[in-house]
Amino acid sequence: MGPKSSERITNIMPTMFPSALSVSRFDGKKLLVIMIIIAVTLTVESQLSMVADFIPEQLASTTGIVAFIGIWVIFTVTQYYILAYIKQNNKSSKARTPLLNLMHRIVTVVQYLLVGIIALNILQILLTQQYNTVFLYITMSISYGLWIITLGLLAKAFFSWYKSKKNLMVLIFAISMIAYVINGFFGLYG
Amino acid sequence: MGKRNLVITSADVAVFPESPSTILTVYQTASAIAYVLTWIATVMLLRPYIEKLGKIKFWTIMGATMVYYLITFPLFTLGYFTPSEI
């Protein structure tokens, strides 16, 4: 007996790019590599932000600016693959949720908007040796806004899942998402 | 935000004043609760992998994330380790 049509659909990945890193050939291993790269970069970036007050000269030096641009490039490239991977999964999924597709579109637009704003900031640093903090405020506001909306929706989904399953783990995830939303609100306000 | 410089030049040191203490307290408390709850739920989610990885490996990986947080949170987020103290 051949596979059902829905099963066949999940295995079809239309080719978008002919390279080895094309999204169409994206398997679990490649996703793991991308996730490890992001985890390492995020850890380095968060550590730098924590010790930023100790090393202002190093951060303003050429090495510091190159590191900043490098982190921006890594996030730009990896987010492209993750967004494309999620898009492929959504397309091949049996679940049809218009909200999920809408959220994917919003997240994609916002992520590229953030990439563009940071690119403007980098250009400004490279060309004029200074930057406007207004760009940072806009970036932070957009990031926190997206954070609040997506995690709020996730909390709602977890709570509705808990209502039907009565699973403690799902409830803990739901409460933690609420805590993240509160964290986002006060981060935006502060 | 209004107190901060609008333009930071290469000769400046970018200083971002802290938020009012009440906002900061709620922000940090929510952050800590969210992290710990996510960690607990993640342990529950990944528990079946104890058999595959072994108890020691599993708890080393999961424990490392919590130890990392417990070290960085008081030092940097709560400000026990700031430039003024060195």
Image (cartoon, coloured by chain):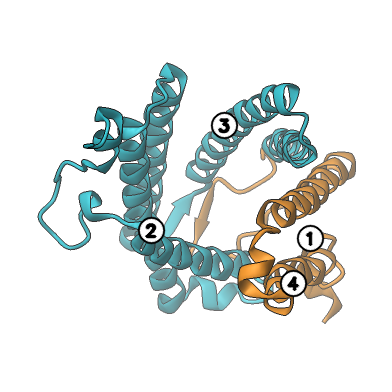
The chain letter corresponding to cyan is: A
How would you rate the neighbour count of disc 1 (Cα within 10 Å): few for under 14, some for 14-19, many for 20 or more?
A: some
Task: Tell me if residue B74 can be seen.
Answer: yes
Judging depth in this view, the residue of A139 and A162 nearest the camera is: A162
Q: Chain of mark 1?
A: B
Q: Is residue B61 above or below residue A35?
A: below
Q: CA distance from mark 2 to mark 3?
A: 24 Å
Q: Which numbered dot is residue A81?
A: none
Expressed as whole percent of the image width and height from the top left, the position of residue B77 reads: 79, 60
Q: CA distance from mark 4 to mark 3?
A: 30 Å
> Is disc 2 placed on a helix, strand or loop?
helix
The residue drawn where x is 80% and y is 38% is A168
Q: Nearer the viewer, mark 3 or mark 1?
A: 3
- Residue where numbered disc 3 is placed: A150
The residue drawn where x is 45% and y is 53% is A131
Q: Say which colour chain B has.
A: orange
Q: Which numbered dot is residue B77?
A: 1
Q: CA distance from mark 2 to mark 1?
A: 35 Å
Q: Chain of mark 4?
A: B
Q: CA distance from mark 3 to mark 1?
A: 24 Å
User: For the C terminus of chain B, which image quadrant?
Assistant: bottom right
- Residue where numbered disc 4 is placed: B59
